[in-house]
Image (cartoon, rainbow, N blue to C red):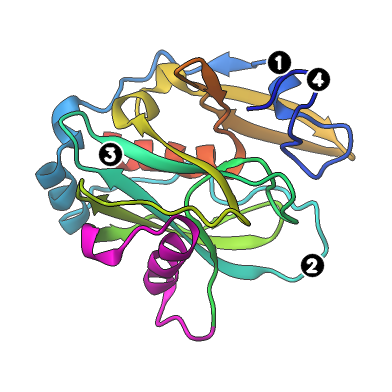
Amino acid sequence: MSSSDHITPLSKLPNFDPRTVPVAGVDAHLPPVPAERLRAQALRQRFAAPPDWQPEVRVEPRFTRRAPAQAAVLVPLVVRPEPTLLLTQRTSHLANHSGQIAFPGGKVDPTDADAVDAALREAEEEVGLARDFVQVLGTLPIYTTGSAFVITPVVALVQPGFTLTLNEGEVADVFEVPLSFILDPANHRRHAMEAEGVRREWFSMPYQDAGVERFIWGATAGMLRNFYRFLAA
């Protein structure tokens, strides 16, 4: 992220920086998802015949009075020898979730056929990910953020060879994280605090990317935690 003398704010809550909240626990006691389940064919089979499972995080405590908005994100799994997850870092001036690590995505528009179409459109608009490289596997349970976005996570395989062009008005950077890192609970940290009279709990999954800390937390980490539960079930 930024240097210590100019830290990008990661939340609209006043005087709150998630990076400074102590770690309440790490889930190293839970097993990682086996490597063979991260391969493309295994992922296709898992979505084609889902197991009996329950998401761990579905609704965050609200901190806004605005009306809920339907949204969709793409969870892009890049098919490499070591599979990766493609994530973005949002620009610092955006009204919602500025500076945060996020999936490509946004509000569902009236012209979108459905949430899947919205996720694919947003990925094209934000990072230039062409649909020709994307194979949608399915969706994860709806996740409602504290900022009142009702999000459908759309999981997809992405074939290598794509070229990305960032929308600089929305995306500051894009990077890939090994899927094995994301789906190992030894890298899942739990946090909790009281904010404005409400107890808030969340996960973080800080990833060291060539000396830069990518602080994955909040809704992005919550949806990834659900993805872990889905694949580990």
Label 3 close to label 1 by CB (< 8 Å): no
Image height of 150 relative to 189, above or below: below
Region of the chain picked out in magenta, as a range: 110-133
Measured in 3D between alpha carbons, the distance from the residue under mark 1 to the one under mark 2, in whole angstroms, is 30 Å
- Packing grade of label 2 (10 A; few <14, some 14-19, many >=20) is few
Q: Quadrant of the C terminus?
A: top left
Picture quarter containing residue 193?
top right
Please give the name of the residue rendered at 18% of the width and 26% of the height, measured from the top-left corner: 35
Q: Is residue 130 magenta?
A: yes
Picture quarter containing residue 127?
bottom left
Q: Which mark is residue 66?
A: 2
* Magenta residues, dominant SS class: helix
Residue at disc 2, secondary structure: loop
Q: Which residue is mark 1?
A: 22
Amino acid type at circle 2 is Arg
Q: Which residue is mark 3?
A: 231
First reached walking from the N terminus: tag 4 or tag 1: 4
